[in-house]
Image (cartoon, helix red, strand yellow):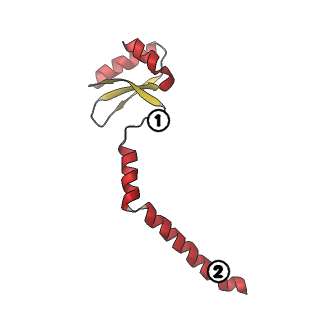
Amino acid sequence: MLLYALAPLIALVAVGGLIAVLRWTFSGESLELHREIVTAEDYGLLRAAVVVDDPASAEAVRQRLTDAGIRCTTAVGRDRRVRVLVFADELEKARRVVG
Protein backbone atom coordinates (compact mmCIF):
# COMPACT_ATOMS: atom_id res chain seq x y z
CA MET A 1 0.00 0.00 0.00
CA LEU A 2 2.82 2.38 0.89
CA LEU A 3 4.53 1.63 -2.43
CA TYR A 4 1.44 2.72 -4.35
CA ALA A 5 1.46 6.03 -2.48
CA LEU A 6 5.17 6.67 -3.04
CA ALA A 7 5.32 5.68 -6.74
CA PRO A 8 3.93 9.01 -8.07
CA LEU A 9 6.26 10.94 -5.76
CA ILE A 10 9.28 8.94 -6.96
CA ALA A 11 8.24 9.53 -10.58
CA LEU A 12 7.93 13.29 -10.02
CA VAL A 13 11.37 13.45 -8.37
CA ALA A 14 12.91 11.49 -11.27
CA VAL A 15 11.30 13.76 -13.88
CA GLY A 16 12.41 16.84 -11.94
CA GLY A 17 15.99 15.56 -11.85
CA LEU A 18 15.89 14.86 -15.56
CA ILE A 19 14.61 18.38 -16.24
CA ALA A 20 17.43 19.87 -14.15
CA VAL A 21 20.09 17.85 -15.99
CA LEU A 22 18.68 18.74 -19.41
CA ARG A 23 18.44 22.45 -18.55
CA TRP A 24 22.10 22.45 -17.54
CA THR A 25 23.12 20.44 -20.61
CA PHE A 26 21.43 22.80 -23.05
CA SER A 27 22.23 26.05 -21.26
CA GLY A 28 24.26 28.67 -23.12
CA GLU A 29 27.42 28.01 -21.09
CA SER A 30 27.61 24.31 -21.90
CA LEU A 31 26.81 24.96 -25.58
CA GLU A 32 29.64 27.52 -25.74
CA LEU A 33 32.05 24.97 -24.27
CA HIS A 34 30.86 22.40 -26.81
CA ARG A 35 31.36 24.91 -29.65
CA GLU A 36 34.96 25.51 -28.52
CA ILE A 37 35.65 21.78 -28.47
CA VAL A 38 34.17 21.21 -31.93
CA THR A 39 35.94 24.13 -33.61
CA ALA A 40 39.36 23.35 -32.16
CA GLU A 41 41.64 21.60 -34.64
CA ASP A 42 42.29 18.45 -32.69
CA TYR A 43 43.27 15.37 -34.63
CA GLY A 44 43.52 13.03 -31.66
CA LEU A 45 46.65 10.90 -31.88
CA LEU A 46 47.71 12.51 -35.17
CA ARG A 47 50.05 15.48 -35.53
CA ALA A 48 50.63 17.77 -38.50
CA ALA A 49 53.96 16.92 -40.08
CA VAL A 50 53.52 19.36 -42.96
CA VAL A 51 51.06 22.17 -43.74
CA VAL A 52 50.71 23.11 -47.41
CA ASP A 53 48.43 25.39 -49.43
CA ASP A 54 46.95 22.99 -51.97
CA PRO A 55 45.76 19.36 -52.09
CA ALA A 56 48.16 18.41 -54.90
CA SER A 57 51.19 19.30 -52.78
CA ALA A 58 49.71 17.45 -49.81
CA GLU A 59 49.17 14.36 -51.96
CA ALA A 60 52.79 14.47 -53.14
CA VAL A 61 54.02 14.69 -49.54
CA ARG A 62 51.62 11.94 -48.46
CA GLN A 63 52.89 9.66 -51.21
CA ARG A 64 56.50 10.34 -50.23
CA LEU A 65 55.78 9.49 -46.61
CA THR A 66 53.88 6.36 -47.60
CA ASP A 67 56.82 5.23 -49.72
CA ALA A 68 59.03 5.69 -46.63
CA GLY A 69 56.70 3.41 -44.65
CA ILE A 70 55.10 6.16 -42.58
CA ARG A 71 51.33 5.94 -42.04
CA CYS A 72 49.72 9.27 -42.90
CA THR A 73 46.58 11.02 -44.02
CA THR A 74 45.47 14.54 -44.94
CA ALA A 75 42.98 16.99 -43.47
CA VAL A 76 41.86 20.47 -44.42
CA GLY A 77 41.98 22.99 -41.57
CA ARG A 78 39.74 25.96 -40.87
CA ASP A 79 42.23 28.15 -42.71
CA ARG A 80 41.72 26.00 -45.85
CA ARG A 81 45.33 24.81 -45.72
CA VAL A 82 45.97 21.09 -46.04
CA ARG A 83 47.71 19.23 -43.23
CA VAL A 84 49.54 15.96 -43.70
CA LEU A 85 48.97 14.09 -40.47
CA VAL A 86 51.09 11.33 -38.95
CA PHE A 87 51.09 9.55 -35.61
CA ALA A 88 53.02 11.36 -32.88
CA ASP A 89 55.67 8.65 -32.59
CA GLU A 90 56.49 9.01 -36.32
CA LEU A 91 56.44 12.83 -36.42
CA GLU A 92 60.20 13.42 -36.33
CA LYS A 93 60.88 10.71 -38.89
CA ALA A 94 58.22 12.20 -41.19
CA ARG A 95 59.71 15.68 -40.92
CA ARG A 96 63.16 14.30 -41.77
CA VAL A 97 61.79 12.47 -44.82
CA VAL A 98 60.02 15.58 -46.09
CA GLY A 99 63.01 17.75 -45.35
Give residue 36's position: percent from left, percent from top. 37, 47
Task: Tell me where residue 51 sits by quadrant.
Answer: top left
Q: Which is more N-terminal, label 2 or label 1?
A: 2
Task: Tell me where residue 67 sits by quadrant.
Answer: top left
Residue shown at 39% from the left, 45% from the top: 38
Residue beneath disc 1: 44
| Left or right of 79 on screen, residue 61 | right
Residues under labels 1 and 2: Cα distance? 46 Å
Residue shown at 70% from the left, 82% from the top: 3
Relative to 63, does residue 20 appear above or below in the rendering?
below
Give residue 90's position: percent from left, percent from top. 48, 20
Q: Toward the viewer: 92 or 43?
A: 92
Quarter containing the N terminus: bottom right
Residue shown at 39% from the left, 20% from the top: 62
| Left or right of 61 on screen, residue 17 | right
Q: Toward the viewer: 70 or 28?
A: 28
Circle 1: residue type: Gly
Quarter containing the C terminus: top left
Circle 2: residue type: Ala
Residue shown at 43% from the left, 17% from the top: 94
Relative to 48, does residue 95 appear above or below in the rendering?
above
Give residue 4's position: percent from left, percent from top. 68, 84
Residue beneath disc 2: 7
Label 2 sits on a secondary structure element that is helix
Give residue 73's position: percent from left, percent from top. 42, 26
